Amino acid sequence: MGINDACAAIKKYKRFLITVHTSPEGDALGAEVAFYNLVRKLGKSAIIVNEDKPPYGYDFLCKNKPIHLLSKKEKNIKFDCFVALDCADLKRTGKVYGLNKNNNPVLNIDHHISNNFFGRINWVDPEASSCSEMIFKLFKKLRQKIDKDTALALYTGIMTDTGSFRYSNTTAFTFQAAGELLKYGVNVPYVYRNAYENIPLSDIKLLLRILPKIKFYSQGRIIGFEIKKELIKIKRPSIDLADQLLSFGRSIKGAEVVVLFKENSGEKNQVRVNLRSQGKVDVNKIASFFQGGGHKTASGCTLVGSIEEIEKEVITKIQSYLI
Amino acid sequence: MGINDACAAIKKYKRFLITVHTSPEGDALGAEVAFYNLVRKLGKSAIIVNEDKPPYGYDFLCKNKPIHLLSKKEKNIKFDCFVALDCADLKRTGKVYGLNKNNNPVLNIDHHISNNFFGRINWVDPEASSCSEMIFKLFKKLRQKIDKDTALALYTGIMTDTGSFRYSNTTAFTFQAAGELLKYGVNVPYVYRNAYENIPLSDIKLLLRILPKIKFYSQGRIIGFEIKKELIKIKRPSIDLADQLLSFGRSIKGAEVVVLFKENSGEKNQVRVNLRSQGKVDVNKIASFFQGGGHKTASGCTLVGSIEEIEKEVITKIQSYLI
């Protein structure tokens, strides 16, 4: 099943409930806003319902958009097709799937290689940089014009999921799509600034307390950071500090694995471990050993114990994987 | 004069001396390597001579390339066309221009708006993201095949001059060119990693000593950093720390101007001041006031005095420009 089945479903059904995964990021939000615009252009009715709010800083994309958060009001929405975007598994839609009481057909459009084809109609393309790139293809296939608002949504999705065109998922088609979207009025530095250059001063201050405590193991082949709960208690960060720290770690020459240990503020003694690899070490194997998972270059696990003990244990495990 | 004149010159002349500006970066290096490959494909002879070495980390682009550094040996090179790439002014070629003793025609290919048309043949396109994007156009115009080596050079130039496709110079054509270059075998994360993620541990340690001393003026609308000469004495940095610090400063919400003060290690009491604006404040005016210059969003000046006094003076000037 592929794009043609997705197009057939879009033509067939009349009322769409559109959702994405919990903790949505740029690609999920961009894809759903664009998909909403697409079906509306075709004269269909549609509603977007998400379990979680957009992350900090995404007002530029989500303001004045028909994105509903799950509440009592949404319980009786009528629809004939449930659309899950950017979800590898139906569970990723969170409680929103509970709205499909009548077991209406599910349309699954996603680019994750781990997608389990949970829909009645599935279009899964792991070669696509992003779900937004797939929605771009739908616009072309259905010969619908891309307006400025849709171009912003699609461009934001593509840009954020490729890390501003730097990850290996960036293809010739990705560039071609981005180039076309610019013609509809996307402002490149505006999107970049909103997605990446809007860190609140309070978060910067937190980062500057964590960064200098960077740890180097195995002659700098392993880079470690820790976020202790005392620190987060002072002021809850608006952005995902992990992203910033892991990407700082990756910029260091010779760093093969970057690992972040974060004490959970809620649960007792839980430590979240995030792992990033530059390619040589398969960090999915390491995370799996500790009952976590992910990909070869990005994975995570949650352990119970003191942060010091967990650090020792995980670092020893990573070291055993250095060749 | 435009691309057609450049093509005519390439066809007419037989022996090219190719150079770029002093302190070459990714775009200058990418453009000259690609231009060299272009004229060689056309059966011409060519030599690249630069005044300065490529910056740290550019081995991936320059290794085994015919890039000569100016020395006695180069003094008697025979050529019939002097090619200056990515230079707004002939002076930017440094001492290399001294090789043009016979006043051979100069071919000037550049994308800086401030270019002063110093060549006998000039092709200046301020709309181009980079000089490499212009060389890409030459390959198309002259119907020459782009090989893998050339694609790497052109892609590196385009990527670095657009800050990985995030600055306002990124156009629809830029994306189109990048997309085509990928088809010839460019490895996107490889280029990104080499250009941006290869900071030596010793430089990271320097950065982590400077970053926490960040200064906030005018409720964080001005961000300041300082690099004192004592710090640099410990270990001379391999990378340009200024780039890292200025771009960290730009990522802070509400920052309108980022300013870096750097004590020159050689000259007595000289302080180099680099200014970056997010667009509202014209930092060229500020730099010009102190006998420096640049663009509206990026400029610099050099002052003499104690770093503390200079900081006070420059910050007061910037504050007078905040609306």
Image (cartoon, coloured by chain):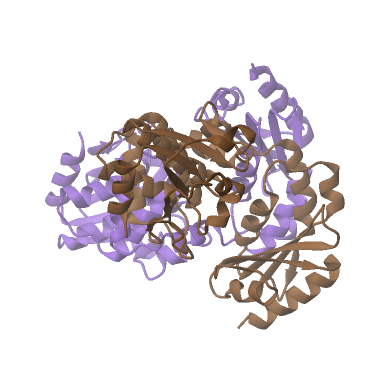
Chain colours: A brown, B purple
User: Is B5 above or below relative to B38?
Assistant: above
Residue at x 57%, y 54% (from the top left corner) = A92
Relative side of A233 to B204, left or right: right
Residue at x 35%, y 60% (from the top left corner) = B152
Residue A294 percent location from the top left of the image:
58, 66
Q: Quadrant of residue B191?
A: bottom left
Residue B78 percent location from the top left of the image:
24, 59
User: Is A180 above or below relative to A271?
Assistant: above
Instruction: Choose between B19 and A141: the one closer to the eye.
Output: A141
State the quadrant of the N terminus of chain B.
top left
Number of disc labels: 0
Instruction: Choose between B312 and A116: the one closer to the eye.
Output: A116
Evaluate whether residue A323 shows in this view: yes
Residue at x 52%, y 44% (from the top left corner) = A26
Instruction: Choose between A321 and B198: the one closer to the eye.
Output: A321
Residue A273 percent location from the top left of the image:
71, 64
Relative side of B115 to B194, left or right: left
